[in-house]
Amino acid sequence: MATALLAPLGGAVRTALRTIEARTPGDRDRAVDGLRALALVSVPTGHWLLGGFTRDAGGALHNASPLTVLGALAPASWVLQMLGIFFLVGGHASVLSLRRATARGASTGAWLRGRLLRLGRPVIGVTAVWAALLPVLYALGVPEATLRTGATLVIQPLWFVGIYVVITALTPYCVRAARRMGAWAAVPLLAAVAVVDALRYGPFADAVPSWLSLLNLLPGWMFAYQLGVCWGERRLGRPAARVLLLGGAALFAALLLFFHYPASMVGVPGQDRTNSHPPSLLVLALAAAQSGAAILLRDRLARVLRRPALWAPVVLINLAAMTILCWHQTAMLSAAVPASFVGTVPGLTTAPDTVGWLAARLAWLPLFAGLLVLIARTTRRFEAPWTGVTRMRRTLAGVLATGFAAFALGLA
């Protein structure tokens, strides 16, 4: 009986797989798409596993991290922190996209506007929706502290969009650097971050202003992007990739063992140093190693993704890239906020300070993923061009988005 009931479902899945395979151009770089999908999936997985809540006596939720107590989990962040791969693939894709646009006769400015609109629409969408939701949730009894926690989580992944926009705008200059210097074009970016780290962590650190670390934002995240541009320009081959893999791994180990960089790639409450905000030299070492491994594994990954059953999820994830980035925290909150009214729910509202919490959180991941899929079915429209949307509605969305950002950042 069960087999008979599932047979139509199996047929539908096979039909969908064949359709996706048939619509994939023969020259599609499946390996690059696969790497992008892997980096995208790592973002919600990392936030869902390495971020938790505590519930106070009033029922309000506050951010907490299992890394505060379970320091042995820090190596998990080395795997889940894949922004280096994301920027590497972004640089590679931008080169190819700019090349195609130029071949069509489009200007660099027109190409850039198109890229920025694709990034901006989903961000405005999620922040505007949350701005409208906040008063409704407050009226329904959700504590203000919970709303601030939720707003912080929603805005947290979006910082990268601003950095990515600036770096994308610099793509033509990255291309020129790649053509002149090859993979060496990324070395000055690495050196810049090393100098800033030496100043803020060296013997004269007390005399260095705190804002100096912000100088690492652009070169720190641009490093992997520049490598991706070099890759797209065919100026970064397998020999250089081996150097990146081995050199990045060696530098990573040296920074941990001899220079006492924090082991976690994400911020841990209570620590006075962080690797990711802004990026430290350890982030670039990891990005170098990841980039080298990605380039070396490209051909093998492309062969694996010739299988329709593996290729279809990659296509679907890439089609909803910004939706996943913008809404995955909302999916987790959709489970945690109702649970906060119930009381202490293991893995949701209990403090993330035991191995038991980790096991419970792992059990919740399928629910978070399912909620994200449901949310994406509605919010996916924000990624498409906003045709038919009046100027007044666009202005209203912008105002709501700005208000939500101010609230989330504690400026409202």
Image (cartoon, rainbow, N blue to C red):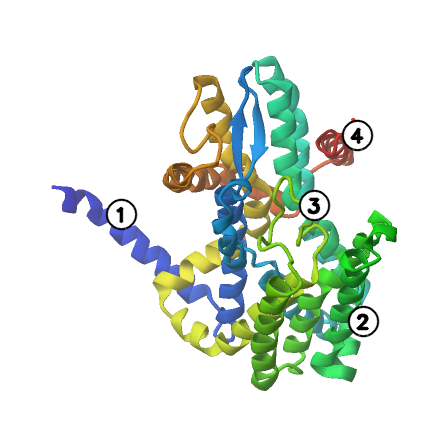
Q: Quadrant of residue 88?
A: bottom right
The kind of secondary structure element at disc 2 is helix
Q: Quadrant of residue 132?
A: top right
Q: Which mark is residue 173?
A: 2
Q: Is 249 located above or below residue 204 in the figure?
A: below
The kind of secondary structure element at disc 4 is loop
The residue pinned by badge 4 equals 411
CA gap between label 4 and label 3 equals 23 Å
Type of residue at label 4?
Answer: Leu
* Quarter occupied by the N terminus: top left
Type of residue at label 1?
Answer: Leu
The residue pinned by badge 1 equals 9
Q: Quadrant of residue 243?
A: bottom right
Of badges 2 and 3, nearer the viewer stands 3
Of badges 4 and 1, nearer the viewer stands 4
Of badges 4 and 3, nearer the viewer stands 3
